[in-house]
């Protein structure tokens, strides 16, 4: 008798998992165009979030090189600093968006 109950529970769990995966698939097919445009906008946002700090760093470094000439290249130092800060900012933003998307999917699957 318990073996039959265990089989029924496994069958119910399997059916629920199949239903969840099917609903995800249908949602993904329905939102395909939205996903493409969202991806393009995300690429643009990431690009600018890296480009702007890099250019600001290079501009500030050039300003320092012109005003206070030294053996070090402030332009190069601040260009790399801006690039690193921009990449870190983009990575942090992407991680936050990924977390938000995963939470939405988990809520919809329940």
Image (cartoon, rainbow, N blue to C red):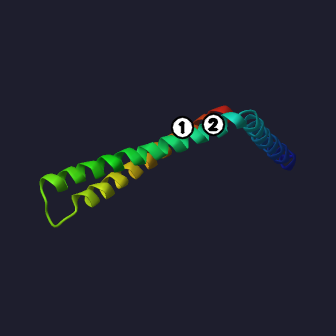
Identify which residue, 14 or 103, lies in the foreground.
103
Q: Say whether residue 43 is visible.
A: yes
Q: Label 2: how many residues lie within 10 Å, few (<14), some (14-19) or many (20+)?
A: few
- Residue 83 rendering spot, x and y as whole percentages: 36, 54
| Residue 8 as seen in the image, left or right of residue 102 | right
> Where does residue 1 sit, x and y in percent of width and height?
87, 46
Q: Residue at x 71, y 34 (%)?
A: 31
Quadrant of residue 66 within the rendered picture: bottom left
**Secondary structure beneath disc 1?**
helix
Vertical relation: 10 (above or below) 32: below
The reply to whether residue 102 is visible in this rendering is no
Residue 64 drawn at (x, y percent): 17, 52
Identify the residue shown where x is 18% and y is 56%: 65
Helix, strand or loop at label 2? It is helix
x, y (%) of residue 71? 16, 67
Viewer-nearest residue: 72 or 50: 72
Q: Which residue shows up at 85% across the image and 50% down it?
A: 3
- Depicted 86 relative to depicted 42: above or below: below
Residue that label 2 marks: 37
User: Any mark on residue 100, and which?
Assistant: 1
The disc, 2 or 1, on the residue closer to the chain's N-terminal end is 2
Vertical order, 59 against 29 (above or below): below
Q: CA distance from mark 2 to mark 1?
A: 18 Å
Query: Which quadrant is home to the C terminus?
Result: top right
- For residue 26, what is the image quadrant? top right
């Amino acid at each position: 008798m318990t073996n039959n109950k265990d089989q029924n529970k496994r069958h119910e769990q399997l059916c629920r998992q199949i239903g969840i995966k099917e609903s995800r698939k249908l949602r993904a097919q329905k939102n395909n165009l939205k996903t493409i445009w969202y991806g393009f906008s995300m690429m643009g946002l990431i690009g600018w979030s890296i480009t702007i700090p890099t250019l600001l760093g290079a501009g500030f470094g050039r300003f320092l090189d012109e005003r206070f000439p030294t053996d070090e290249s402030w332009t190069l130092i601040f260009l790399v600093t801006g690039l690193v800060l921009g990449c870190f900012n983009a990575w942090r933003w992407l991680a936050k968006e990924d977390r938000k998307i995963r939470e939405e999917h988990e809520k919809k699957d329940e």
